[in-house]
Amino acid sequence: MAVLIDGNSLAAQIREEVQAEVAQLRDSSGVVPGLNLLLVGDDPASAVYVRNKGKDCEKVGITSTILRLPDTATEQEVLDIVRTWNDDASVHGILVQLPLPKHINEHRVINAISPLKDVDGFHPENAGKVMIGLDGFIPCTPYGVLEMLRRYNIETSGKHAVVVGRSNIVGKPLSILLAQKRSPGNATVTICHTGTPNIAEYTRTADILISAVGSHGVITKDHVKPGAVVIDVGINRITLPDGTTKLVGDVLFDEVEPIAQAITPVPGGVGPMTRAMLLRNTLTSAQRVGGKQ
Ligand code: GUN
């Protein structure tokens, strides 16, 4: 039986910590952290994500403002909004929900966000800072995974971490962070991706296996060394034979759990941590303005 890494309870703990620091910051400096979210178009999943992020803010005393634009909005309109928020001192975090409609260039929009307010950690300046170990904003999902490892006292130093997936948001930054000479970190890191001929050959040697692919079933028991720590970043919706749908990860949980040392469930694993770290990043941004750090 593996230890279940409980993202819900860890995230609740982080929200409590953030809430206390938000109150402290407000009392000591008058600064109230603010997160502005921009949603373009009417993708139902994105709408839910944005609404949840707004609710999370409310719980901890962060002011959130959601602006919704129709999918006919132009790139220029989006850029103008971002620039207005860059110049607004009451806004400490800016989040433009992705994906954007096809006619809007995501890179140009992300580049327009002030790196000091880029609480998603997507701006090239923050990506560069992660690469060389400087303080910037760590993208929320890799940051959440690091916090899970840290708070469950999972040793990473000298271990072999295998990351499956090389996205700019998860796989790439997480690989770099795990290799860095700090804690958690100092691991030997292998990145597997769609160009890797036999993924199992690598994953079977992992002490810490992290899957960030977005495809259910890519990690089976044959991919996992007994006693490994398994972190499942995937969130996939599958349709069951009776027609209902269900959220599942990349990992075949039922067959991997019995051989793992520790494992994250889906839902209730990495997902809630991602949301919690967005609050932490927004607070950090406000603390920089309010005099702390
Ligand atoms: N779309 C899916 N995940 C994310 C995220 O973490 N941030 C933003 N801005 N858009 C997303």
Image (cartoon, rainbow, N blue to C red):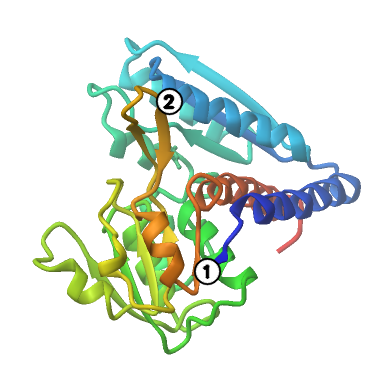
Horizontally, is 293 left or right of 123 in the view?
right
Mark nearer the viewer, 1 or 2: 1
> Mark 1 — residue?
2
* Residue furthest bottom in the image: 158
Residue 223 in the image: state x and y as whole percent. 27, 68
Horizontally, is 203 left or right of 235 in the view?
left
Quarter of the image where ligand 1 sits: top left
* Element marked by disc 2: helix
Residue 272 in the image: state x and y as whole percent. 57, 46
Determine if residue 273 is in view: yes
Q: Amino acid at mark 2?
A: Ala
* Element marked by disc 1: loop
Q: Which quadrant, please, contains the C terminus?
A: bottom right
Determine if residue 90 is in view: no
Q: Nearer the viewer, residue 153 or 255?
A: 255
Residue 51 in the image: state x and y as whole percent. 57, 25
Residue at the image point whose x is 57% and y is 51% from the top: 273
Horizontally, is 234 left or right of 10 in the view?
left
Q: Is mark 1 within 8 Å of ligand 1?
A: no
Q: Nearer the viewer, residue 238 or 199?
A: 238
> Mark 2 — residue?
45
Q: Please state the total of marks drawn on the protein image.
A: 2
Q: Nearer the viewer, residue 274 or 102?
A: 274
Horizontally, is 60 left or right of 126 in the view?
right
Residue at the image point whose x is 73% and y is 32% from the top: 58
Q: CA distance from mark 1 to mark 2?
A: 31 Å
